[in-house]
Image (cartoon, helix red, strand yellow):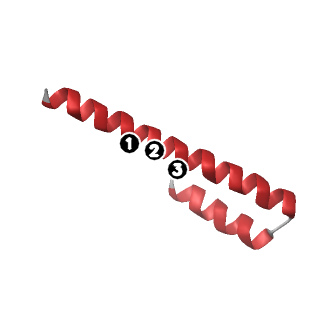
Amino acid sequence: MNGRRQDNQKNADAAHRENIQKSLQHRLEIARAKGDEALIRQLEAEANYFH
């Protein structure tokens, strides 16, 4: 039972991380489209934190 709970937590953690990365990527695409250099640098720094 405990092993299954750990697997579920790992899966949830991985899904959460993936969602954060997708959101960051989308926000970065929008910032690039708008030409917002300050926001681009900020989002790139945030994305690097997750890599």
Looking at the image, residue 26 lies above or below residue 41: above
Return the x and y of residue 4 as percentages of the image width and height. Answer: 21, 27
Name the image quarter holding residue 22: top right
The residue singled out by tag 2 in the image is: 16
Q: Which element carries disc 3, helix, strand or loop? A: loop
Return the x and y of residue 39 as percentages of the image width and height. Answer: 72, 69
Tag 3: amino acid: His
Looking at the image, residue 3 lies above or below residue 34: above
Residue occupying the far left of the picture: 1
Q: Which mark is residue 51?
A: 3
Circles 1 and 2: CB distance less than 8 Å? Answer: yes
Tag 1: amino acid: Asp
Marked residue nearer the N-terminal end (2 or 3): 2
Q: Does 13 sit left or right of 34 as displayed?
A: left
Q: Which element carries disc 2, helix, strand or loop? A: helix
Category of crowding for the residue at label 3, using alpha-carbon neighbours closer than 10 angstroms: few (below 14), some (14–19), many (at least 20): few
**Residue at the spot 30% in from the left edge and 32% down from the top edge:** 8
Q: Does 6 sit left or right of 26 as displayed?
A: left
The residue singled out by tag 1 in the image is: 13
Circles 2 and 3: CB distance less than 8 Å? Answer: no
